[in-house]
Amino acid sequence: MAGIGYGKAILFGEHFVVYGMPGIAASIELNTTCTYEEKVSGGITANDLVTGETINYGEDKAKKLDQVIQVILRETGIKEKNFRLKLETNMSLMGGMGSSAALGVSILRCLNKEFSLGIDDKRINEITFEVEKVFHSSPSGIDNTVSTFGGMLWFKKGQKNTVEQLGIPEPVRIVLIDTGTINDTAELIAKVRKQKEENQKEFEKIFASYSELALKARKEVENARWEKVGSLMNKNQELLRRIGVSSSQLEKIIEASLESGALGAKLTGAGVGGNAIALTPEKELQEKVSKKCSALGFKTFKVTAGIKP
Ligand code: PMV
């Protein structure tokens, strides 16, 4: 039996959510599928559906995958060890699409069916948060929440997280553009924290600007006023630049997207490498932005944001 975990795109608030400010994130069609294979030696095999190749996670990530399985077996109480999980993905890995959360959700949904665990989405979200901690040490919880519940979400970390569905009429077209450079979320969270400690006054100002921007963004998203949303995404990108998580590759992509008519463009996820998001509600516009970025040598993904799993 198979389980699916969806990827996500952050429209507003990466890094700011770590400090308890609200963010807006949406699930996308790109996903990871986990299939259960019984009576074979334990472990995980993973295939990249885009390249058709077996994914080599490298020693460090392979160790983390082992830890993830331990966390999942512990939290679900599964004693059976004689099985293998086959993962297949069409997402950028370590690229700001929430691949680690999608991995956790796909495994849990698969095992939930296979062992008739009867665990609900709330629990899947909680356990995937534990999985996220294995990969990213101090995540906000936004990725696991979007991957579990889907839709267009307003998320705010707290004693108890605030999670609200923003009712949009239909998922909105976007382009995700991959810089081709992977990012390490834990490292980047640590980098921002260090910058914040060293530039307290500047960060206070940036945080205040972001908090105001997030409230405006919520209103515009809820009313599907995409031109306004796009212009606020551009402002969010300015703030992300100031906290030091943009890069020349991301800026090149953002510039090309805006020149091609995208309503807004910014990095999405932890930044520095990974993906940028361009807001392109019309099909032709999505095509145009994608073509332009492909011509510059970047891999692009034409998807919709806000799908319900
Ligand atoms: O792991 P990524 O690249 O999808 O980034 C997630 C967003 C961050 O705010 C940078 C981290 C977090 O846990 O919120």
Image (cartoon, rainbow, N blue to C red):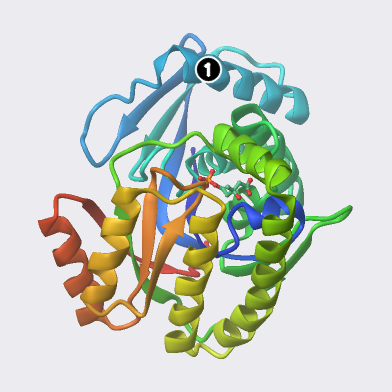
Say which quarter of the image contains residue 32: top left
Q: Secondary structure at mark 1?
A: strand
Say which quarter of the image contains residue 12: bottom right
**Residue 5 in the image: above or below residue 276:** above
Q: Residue at x 61, y 24 (%)?
A: 68
Left or right: residue 187 versus residue 214 is left
In the rendered structure, which amino acid carries the disc numbered 1?
A: Phe
Badge 1: how crowded within 10 Å, few (<14), some, or many (20+)?
some
In this rendering, does residue 77 appear at all?
yes
Q: Residue at x 49, y 20 (%)?
A: 61
Instruction: Establish whether ligand 1 lies closer than 8 Å to the Cβ of label 1.
Output: no
Give percent across and percent down for residue 160.
86, 55
In this rendering, does residue 114 appear at all?
no
Looking at the image, which is closer to me, 27 or 227?
227
Give percent across and percent down for residue 247.
38, 48
Give percent across and percent down for residue 249.
29, 49
**Residue 227 in the image: above or below residue 34:** below
Give percent across and percent down for residue 88.
37, 36
Left or right: residue 48 versus residue 37 is left
Pointer 1 residue: 83
Q: Residue furthest left?
A: 295
